[in-house]
Amino acid sequence: MLKKLSCACFLTFILTACSTTTSNKTAKDNIFTLQVLGINDFHGQVLPKQERGGMRNLAAHLLAATESTSDHTFILHAGDHVGASPAESALLQDEPSITFLNYMADFCQNHQQETCHVIGTAGNHEFDEGTPEMLRLLHGGVHAKGPFLEPSWAGAKYTNLSANVFDRESGQLILPPYVIKQVNGVEIGIIGLTLDYTPDLVVPGAVDDLYFADQAKVARRYVTLLEEQGINAIIIVVHDGTRDKYYSGATQTNARIDKNSKFGQFLSQLPTAVDLVVTGHSHRFTNAYFSRKNAPSLLVTQAFSSGRAYADITLTIDPAVQDITKASAEVIFANADPDLLLSSAAQATLQKVDNLISSAVSFAQAYTEQVIGTYRPKANEADLGVFIANSHQYMLNTDMGIMNKGGVRSTLKTGPVKWGDLFAVQPFNNPLIVREFTGVQLLALIDESQHWTSNITRGFDGSILWQGQALEPTRQYTVAGNAYIMNTERFAVGKLLRVDILDIDATSAYIKLVGPVFNYSSLPKSR
Ligand SMILES: [Zn+2]
C-alpha cells in the first residue's frame, strides 16, 4: 500500500492533524520510540484520593515523565474525565478538570515543539448532564450557574474524540472520530470510542438525542479507513475495560485478558492493525498482551482512576514499515513524590495547577461552608435515610419517597449542618426521578433491608401501609427517588414521569423548611 509521508494536504477528512515534526532522521532507517501516557476516569479529582492522584500529584508525574525522555509524547485519556466528581469540581461544572488538561496540553506543546499532544475520548459520565452541557464543557460557553473561575469559558484546548456517538437528527458524529498525528515522518492514527451502553448508565432522557453505535463495528470501520490512507500505526482509546491483579514493572507476557469476557470479545473483534488499546471505565489495573491469531499480541492498559496512576507506555516505531513494532507499559502510581525532577517550565505549570486547585477549593467552599440548619437529635428519631426519603417526597410533591441504603454515605453531627456535610451524605449529584407504580407493584418492591421509604409503615400484621391505609392494588402512586435507585431494573418497571432537581438540593431545601433546628423525624407543618 502507498505510504504517504506528507500530511493532511490530500486527505479529504477535515480532522486530520497537520502537525509537523522536524527531525534529522530519514524516515526509512531510524527506529524510534514514542511515549504514551495513559490516564482514565479522572472524575474531577481536584484533591488527592487515598493520598494519591488528584491534580497536583498527577500533574507532577505527567510533567516529569514528559521531561524524562527525548521521545515525543501523547497523553491519552480514556474517558470519564468529568462527572461523578467531588464538590471542588462538580460545583464548577467540572471546568477545573478541563483546565487541568489544558495546562498539560500547553506544557507539552511548548516542551516538545508542538509534537506533544493531549487527546481524550468521551466516557459515559461525560453525558451525565446531556449533550448540550457535554459540548459546552468542551467547546466553550458560560454555564447558567456560571461563570466560575473564568469569566468566559473557552473549553478544551486538546482534541476530544468519539467515533461511535451520533446525533440522531442529523446522523452526524458529535465529536471527531479519530485524529492523525505525525511523528518522525510516521503517521499515527488515534481512534476514540465511547462505551456503547452509555444510555443505560445515564438518567433517562439525557441522551435521547444521541445514538451510540457498537464499539467494535465502528472501530473496524475507522481502522479500515486509516489503513486505506496508508496508516499502519493505530491506537484505540476506549472508555471500556477489564480488571486484572496489580503488578509493578513492565508488561508481563503471562498477564491475560479473558477472551470470553465482554471486553475480551470486543478486543477479539478489533482488526490486527490495532497496536495499542488504552482503556478505562472499570477503574482497575490492566497491563496485558491480548493474543491474536496471525498477528503480534495487542497491548492493553488501564491505570485505576482519579489520577492515582498512569500507564507509561513505550511504543517502538519502525519508519521502514510505518508501524508500531513493539509495545510495552508500566502502570505507575501518582504518589506525592518530592523527588521528581522538574525543569523550571514544568515547575511553572505545576504552580498554575496549584493555583487552579486553591481557586476551585475556595470557590466550592462558598457553597460547602453555608450553614443550612442545626441538627439536634432526639430519642427514637427516624433514620437519616428516612429523613432523606421524606425530603425527596416532600420537595417533589409525590406520594412516597425512597432512598437506597448504600446511597447514604455519611451521618450528621449534632450542631450546625453545612452544605458540605449534606454533600458528604449524598455525594453523587444524582437528579431525582419520579416514577408511577400501582399498589401491586409497590407491594413487590418495598424491601426495608434495601431501602428507606417515606409515608410507608407496617401494620400490626406486617402488612404495608401507605399513610396508615392498605395500598390499593390498582391505584397509581407517585414515587420520588434518586436516579441510581429509580433506574435499577426493579424500579424501572414504574412509568417515568419526570427527571427533577438534584437529590442534595431537595434535602437542603427541605431542611430550610423544617428547620432551623431539626432532627430526623422533623416534618414540615403542612404544604
Ligand atoms: Zn465509565
Image (spheres, grey):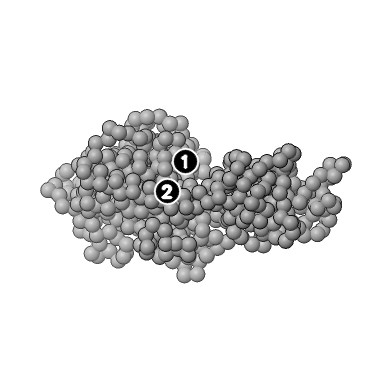
Task: Determine whether label 1 and label 2 are within 8 Å by CB.
Answer: no
Q: Which mark is residue 300?
A: none
Task: Say whether residue 323 is visible.
Answer: no
Amino acid type shown at disc 2: Val
Give the quadrant of residue 6.
Answer: bottom left
Q: Are there few (<14), some (14-19), or many (20+) residues within 10 Å of tag 1? A: some
Q: Which residue corresponds to the image point at 37% horizontal and 29% vertical from the top-left?
A: 248
Position in image of residue 221 (x %, y %): 40, 56
| Depth order, front residue of 131/427 | 427
Disc 2 within 8 angstroms of ligand 1 (CB): no
**Label 2 element class:** helix
Looking at the picture, does residue 135 appear above or below residue 404?
below
Question: Viewer-proximal residue, 47 or 263?
Answer: 47
**Disc 1 marks which residue?**
283
**Name of the residue lying farthest toward the left:** 24
- For residue 466, side relative to residue 293 (left or right): right
User: What residue is shown with label 2?
Assistant: 361
Classify 418 as above or below 251: below
Indicate the quadrant containing the C terminus: top left, top right, bottom left or bottom right. bottom right
Check disc 1 and report its element: helix, strand or loop: loop
Q: Residue 8: x percent and y percent?
A: 25, 62
Pinpoint residue 252: horizontal percent, then vertical percent: 37, 30
